[in-house]
């Protein structure tokens, strides 16, 4: 299927009569030129359809589809007269593209030469989706639901036709999106449901907890909230396991271990796009910048992102701003509430305040679960390093607890909050005092090595209630 567009320019300057009218007054001249353009528009549209020479019944074989939604027989023609754009577009079978284009160029030769028409454009690889039913034109929400389902599935609508027919709304979409579009619309109208394919990267403490929540909640979410979540891929540091339908969440660890293949983020991404569910989201539960390096690509591909990973939003400002810009333009979701305050709604509260006209004067809080745990539990009975190891076992620390103890984790959170408040801040602008940690200890980049070295460097230096503890116990101000 393809879409043929005929775009024309306004007729105004070429007629003396109109020039005279233009001088009379802006309002009258605008009205008349609009009228002139509209008449021209309509004539061009009627000519274009007759040149294409298709009776409605021959359109039947243009439509790939089945079932109630894709009722080819009732599809008359996907024609849109877009007077605001001054273009006419209509769909013809792909194999007719060149013939139709030649016919249009021949017929409009004079208009094109005189620059009354700007171009004849062929858009290939399109599909028509028709929603068909009774009393559609007089039932509120039908078109809203159709377009909302397509929009939630990030499907671009190239053209549409509703007219005042009781039976049919027709949309033209990219051929690659056809099956997803059909599923999105079908599940909206028939199951009143949104289906979401989930890919999880990083099944560590947080990722595992999320998978367990999915296991417990998917049936309830489907029943009560009409959201059908299906985990289609899981990837850790070395392996990935992909499913065409949904991963059995009572058994995912074994599946990943025994049937997982070497991880490949490009294949993982393609898999999240290729299945037939209308919506896809990747949840990044790593603390890895190799993974965040894919965010832009994912958003561009229409894959939503949810993450507690702080790296992307506390990295270089330009990179963060670029992501946020793309997110706003595309309407694809990028959720990162979990980066600050874990389960607490801090970012959404700030947004609510700012969005309703408040000015944020100050943010104050204890932003580190790990440091709170250390302060609450370090009373001299056990060595400091042991309490840090306990905090890691509790799942409180970063993958490498060095990031918590240096204050880097808090620094990242402050940077994220500051940016939410509209400040153009870099991580380097946040004062993080690492001086009290030995260079040797600072050099360890793996959690194992860091925890191994910790007793040597810490247990001597840190005393419960001592000076160092008091220095670190301060809350954080922005
Ligand atoms: N712990 C907490 O309370 C909170 C944590 N966060 C954030 O959540 C994120 C995860 O933390 P947490 O679960 O504690 O960390 P974990 O160390 O427990 O888990 C990290 C996971 O990421 C995987 N991983 C690391 N690198 C890659 C990679 N390049 N590709 C694929 N997978 C990778 C690891 O794989 P493997 O299993 O093979 O090692 C592991 O499964 C962090 O960004 C953290 O800042 C946010 C709020 C609260
Ligand atoms: N390591 C972090 C976890 C959440 O971001 C913390 O200790 O608060």
Image (cartoon, rainbow, N blue to C red):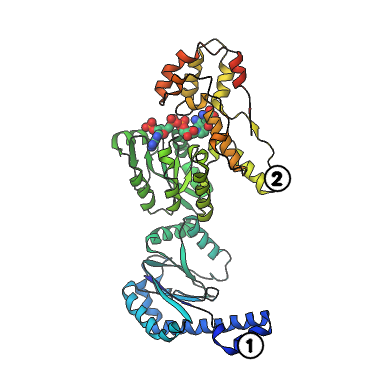
Q: Would residue 3 be found to the left or right of residue 257 on screen? A: right
Query: Residue at 55% across / 38% down in the picture?
Result: 426
Quarter-of-image position of residue 126? bottom left
Q: Which residue is mark 2?
A: 358
Is residue 262 in sight in this rendering?
yes
The residue positioned 55% from the left and 20% from the top of the image is: 374
Q: Note whether 358 is above or below 369 in the view shown.
A: below
Left or right: where 435 falls relative to 197: right
Q: Is mark 2 within 8 Å of ligand 2?
A: no
Please state which of residues 311 and 308 is positioned toward the viewer in this rendering. Answer: 311
Identify the element where label 1 is drawn: helix
**Badge 2 or badge 1: first in the primary sequence:** 1
Residue 27 quadrant: bottom right
Most foreground residue, 394 or 297: 297
Q: Which residue is mark 1?
A: 20
> Looking at the picture, does residue 407 appear above or below residue 304?
above
Q: Nearer the viewer, residue 21 or 225?
A: 21
Q: Residues within 10 Å of mark 1 (few under 14, many from 20)?
A: few
Q: Please name the residue shown 36% across and 72% down the image.
A: 62
């Amino acid at each position: 299927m393809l879409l043929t567009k005929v775009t024309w320019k306004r007729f105004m300057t070429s007629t003396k009569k109109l020039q005279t009218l233009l001088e009379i007054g802006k309002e009258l001249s605008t009205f008349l030129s609009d009228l002139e353009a509209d008449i021209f528009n309509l004539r061009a549209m009627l000519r274009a359809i007759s040149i294409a020479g298709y009776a409605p019944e021959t359109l039947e074989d243009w439509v790939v589809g089945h079932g109630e939604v894709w009722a080819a027989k009732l599809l008359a023609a996907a024609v849109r007269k877009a007077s605001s754009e001054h273009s006419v577009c209509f769909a013809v079978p792909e194999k007719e593209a060149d013939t139709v284009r030649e016919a249009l160029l021949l017929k409009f030769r004079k208009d094109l030469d005189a620059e009354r028409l700007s171009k004849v454009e062929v858009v290939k690889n399109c599909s028509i989706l028709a929603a068909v039913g009774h009393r559609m034109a007089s039932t509120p929400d039908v078109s809203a639901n159709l377009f909302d389902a397509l929009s939630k599935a990030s499907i671009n609508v190239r053209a549409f036709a509703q007219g005042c027919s009781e039976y049919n709304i027709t949309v033209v979409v990219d051929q690659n999106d056809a099956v997803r579009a059909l599923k999105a619309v079908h599940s909206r109208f028939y199951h009143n449901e949104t289906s979401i394919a989930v890919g999880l990267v990083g099944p560590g403490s947080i990722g595992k907890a999320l998978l367990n929540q999915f296991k417990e909640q998917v049936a309830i979410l489907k029943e009560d909230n009409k959201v059908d979540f299906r985990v289609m891929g899981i990837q850790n540091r070395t392996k990935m396991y992909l499913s065409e339908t949904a991963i059995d969440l009572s058994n995912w660890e074994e599946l990943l271990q025994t049937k997982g293949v070497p991880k490949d983020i490009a294949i993982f991404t393609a898999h999240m796009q290729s299945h037939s569910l209308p919506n896809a989201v990747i949840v990044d539960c790593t603390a890895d910048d190799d993974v965040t390096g894919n965010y832009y690509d994912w958003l561009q591909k229409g894959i939503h992102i949810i993450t507690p990973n702080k790296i992307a939003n506390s990295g270089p400002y330009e990179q963060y701003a670029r992501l946020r810009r793309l997110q706003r333009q595309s309407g694809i979701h990028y959720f990162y509430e979990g980066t600050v305050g874990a389960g607490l709604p801090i970012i959404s509260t700030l947004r609510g305040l700012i969005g309703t006209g408040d000015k944020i004067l100050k943010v104050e809080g204890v932003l580190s679960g790990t440091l709170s745990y250390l302060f609450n539990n370090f009373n001299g009975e056990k060595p400091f390093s042991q309490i840090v190891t306990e905090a890691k076992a509790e799942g409180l620390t970063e993958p490498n607890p060095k990031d918590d103890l240096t204050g880097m984790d808090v620094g990242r959170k402050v940077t994220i909050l500051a940016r939410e408040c509209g400040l153009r801040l870099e991580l380097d602008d946040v004062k993080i005092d690492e001086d009290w940690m030995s260079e040797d200890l600072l050099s360890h980049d793996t959690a194992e090595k860091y925890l191994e070295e910790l007793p040597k460097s810490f247990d001597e230096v840190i005393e419960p209630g001592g000076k160092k503890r008091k220095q670190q116990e301060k809350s954080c101000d922005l």
